[in-house]
Amino acid sequence: MSPRSTPGLSPAKAVKRPSLPRQQVFRIESASDPRQNCLAYIPAVHKPDAPVFVSVHGLSINSEEHATLFAPYCEKYGVFMIAPTFDKEHFPDFQRLGRQGLGLRADEALDAVIKEFRAATKTEPAPIHLFGFSGGGQFAHRYAMAHPDHVARVVIAAAGWYTFPDRGEKFPYGLRTIRTIPDLSFDPERFLRVPMTVIVGDQDVQTEHLRITDRVNRQQGVNRLERARNWVGAMQAAARIYRLEPRVTLQTLPGGEHTFGLLMRTSALGDRVFAAMFGEPPAYKNGVHSA
């Protein structure tokens, strides 16, 4: 895992592996596959078992914006951050994890980057705290459903559409396996135990850049707000069928539309995300986080 400078971000010029900079956003490439890269942030004060927060961009591939706007929260909470970049050339199907013939597997690429990041930072292996916005929200909930042991908590913001907990529908609409991802399987009794928070603006009802088909509209609704409500309801109902406590909840942002940066700056999206992930920020004591 090699750090390098990125235009518009604080440079990591003279940093040599395994030394990584703190309190600045920097880009790192996988040592095993340079197509797998991400932005990262290491807070000034953290513990060896500090959580890793992963923020996944949407179709605009604005990972730099994600990393820059979430960095102050990571500093405040004492958590590491990874913001992967799923470029269109290598990961055109990242929202659906990456089907055969449609680029690389995005879930496997994220696992590889996380593994190298933990080795470089000497942090203890643990489930990640996963956030995704829009197309990244699609990736985040599908990753959590496919790999529930890999995640501690998930926040899904403004996803365009969802994989429903329906064994009668083929992935990505439901849980039935498909030949283009033959090793992908779902266990509702495992993924329904993962705490998930869905966040969507109550004005996120535009249909531009939204998947609109009769199949999706019939199953999920006609806009992001309807689809979020219907998916949360379906996940809660599925949990009850398995006699589990529902762990998927919905939050709406008053006046919120469908722009990540605007929601972060004017609708307290960052506050909502980190409260759902980590609760109140830890206090400092003797120069270290007390919790």
Image (cartoon, rainbow, N blue to C red):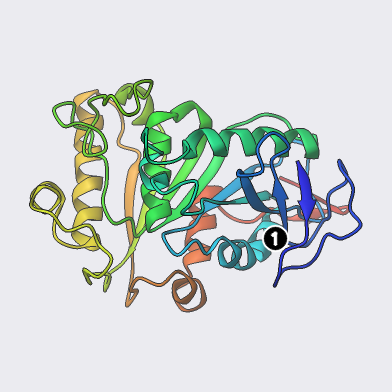
**Place of residue 114 in the rendered image (x, y in percent of width and height, measured from the top left):** 64, 37
Would you identify the image quadrant in which residue 157 lies? bottom left
**Place of residue 194 in the rendered image (x, y in percent of width and height, measured from the top left):** 41, 34
Pick whichever, 151 or 288, lies toward us. Answer: 151
**Place of residue 181 in the rendered image (x, y in percent of width and height, measured from the top left):** 35, 27
Question: Left or right: 240 with respect to 288?
Answer: left
> Which residue corresponds to the image point at 26% horizontal and 26% vertical from the top-left?
178
Question: Left or right: 86 with respect to 5?
Answer: left
Q: Count every numbered label the image shows and give the total.
A: 1
Q: Is residue 156 visible?
A: no
> Which residue corresponds to the image point at 60% horizontal and 48% vertical from the top-left?
53
Pick whichever, 212 or 71, lies toward us. Answer: 212
- Specify few, some or many for label 1: CA neighbours under 10 Å numbering under 14, 14-19, or 20 or more: some
**Place of residue 155 in the rendered image (x, y in percent of width and height, measured from the top left):** 44, 50
Q: Quadrant of the N terminus?
A: top right
- Residue 217 higher or lower than 150, as above or below: below
Question: Left or right: 227 with respect to 263?
Answer: left
Q: Quadrant of the C terminus?
A: top right
> Which residue corresponds to the image point at 66% horizontal and 62% vertical from the top-left?
71
Would you identify the image quadrant in which residue 148 lies? top left
Q: Is residue 36 visible?
A: yes
Q: According to the image, label 1 marks what residue?
A: 76
> Which residue corresponds to the image point at 71% horizontal and 35% vertical from the top-left?
116
- Residue 52 higher or lower than 244, as above or below: below
Query: Disc 1 marks which amino acid?
Result: Lys
Secondary structure type for disc 1: helix
- Residue 96 higher or lower than 100, as above or below: below
